[in-house]
Image (cartoon, helix red, strand yellow):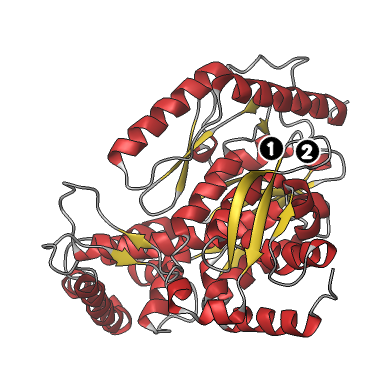
Amino acid sequence: MAEYKYKEADMLHSYVRRNKYRDNLSNTALHIYFEAMPELEKLKTGLCQQTTATYAEIAEYAAISIPTIGLALDALNGVLCAVKKGEPVKVKGGGVATVFRRFTIAELKNEKVAKKIKPQQSKLGEELQKVLNRRSIAYGNTVLAPYWNLSKTGRLYSGSMDGKVNVQLESPEKRMVTMGAILPKGMTLYNFDYRQAEPSVIWKAMERHDFSGDIYDRLAGRLGISRDEAKEKLSFLHYNSQSPVKTVQRWPEATHAEFMPYARALEEFREKLWQQGMWEKKGTRRFVKTLYGSIIKPGRGEKDIHRGKILCWYARGTVADIMHRVCLEIISQEEAKGWKFMFQVHDSAYVISYPGHEETLVSIFKEIPAKQGLYMNIDVKSVGETHLRNAVQLPKSVPAFNFSAWYDAQKKSKDKSALDTPTPLPELPSKEEYIEEMDNMYNETLKEMAQDTE
């Protein structure tokens, strides 16, 4: 094999970093492109040459977990490289592997290649959904296997089976107590929560910085109400069908000096999104693009589309884009860092790690939106295993989970999704394969719980 072209490789990587590819690909995909693929090229073929590799090899060189690889390769295919998954090859022990070839700079500059770059919100949401749907959660005195559904805006919603707990419907305090009670020894449970996530997205889009502090606290102070009540009022101002200016006019006069200029700017921005989001030559069916370029549109026959709803899709879709990237980045580093990503709740996430990793995790939450010029504040809550060990009475055994019923419910949800939503759920494995895999994972979780609580 000829000597690897390091100089040309550096030029290729610099070109990709300078252009818009990084904004449209997940961190998992970028780890594969910048870390795994070059190393595999060096070992086997050469720069931008057709290369064969197993998922295990890709995971090793990219320092990511195998379940995240498939959709990341789908995202890279046709954008930065050509990929064929599952090609029969002679690998140790038999089986299949992936064949890839990275595009040269000349190919990337070619319009036929460049125009294939597409927004990846749904791909990232599907990738995270697929990873979470293959995991179980040790939650208090039981093991849960929530099924996760992807909404129009990209938010992930959990469902439960067998009458067990729906983790997203629990209060934040109860989640911390329940999971903290059975933490492995020496570990810490963290809750990372974006503060004022949706208002921050809206301010960035409007290019306004009217409020240096907490907008909810300021409105609460002006009206003499609680922060939660102020949050509801501001949400109504942003997302209701009524004019923001007319809404603020009905507020007490003490709020007008501070909030009326904001209401006028908000009304202008909502109108801008409304005008931008009209399909050409296709009537009045509206859509909106998030800060990351993801497209959110109404379902066929969906009515009552107004300016406030379009803004809601924009803000929540952008927050979902951010959370997909954050969660997948944390999951990709689990094995190397010893973390355990539990689940997300809209603009917050729960992670178990060793003490001292808080700063690293916070940096992930901050750096991903910062790439888009969004500088967001993070609230962090944590609890160690020694503090809550006795908060939940642990039984000697945990009732078996009915994975067969769970599978049937998810299959039904998937079939319904294919009819009712523009983004269907990912394909499921066979029922027998799924039950066997989840039973094994479930039993391993029970063993860990027993060891950690002795």
Residue 334's disc is none
Residue 179's disc is 1
Where residue 371 sits, quadrant-wise, is bottom right
With 280 as the anchor, is 364 left or right in this view?
right
Tag 2: residue type? Leu
Local crowd size for mark 1, using a 10 Å CA cut-off: few (<14), some (14–19), many (≥20) = many
**Quadrant placement of the N terminus:** bottom right
Residue visible at 55% across and 77% down in the picture: 107
CA gap, disc 2 to disc 1? 7 Å
Determine whether the residue tagged by mark 1 lies in a helix, strand or loop: helix
Local crowd size for mark 2, using a 10 Å CA cut-off: few (<14), some (14–19), many (≥20) = many
Q: Is residue 439 above or below residue 49?
A: above
Residue visible at 55% across and 24% down in the picture: 430
Q: Position of residue 314 (x, y in %)?
A: 35, 65
Q: Can residue 215 be seen at all in this image of the molecule?
A: no
Residue bearing the label numbered 2: 183
Residue nearest the observer in this picture, 363 or 285:
285
Q: Position of residue 159 (x, y in %)?
A: 47, 32
Tag 1: residue type? Met
Residue visible at 62% across and 76% down in the picture: 104
**Quadrant placement of the C terminus:** top right
Q: Are marks 2 and 1 in contact (CB under 8 Å)?
A: yes
Residue nearest the observer in this picture, 215 or 198:
198
Report how many numbered discs are placed on residues in the image.
2
Residue nearest the observer in this picture, 324 or 393:
324
Q: Is residue 301 above or below residue 278?
A: above
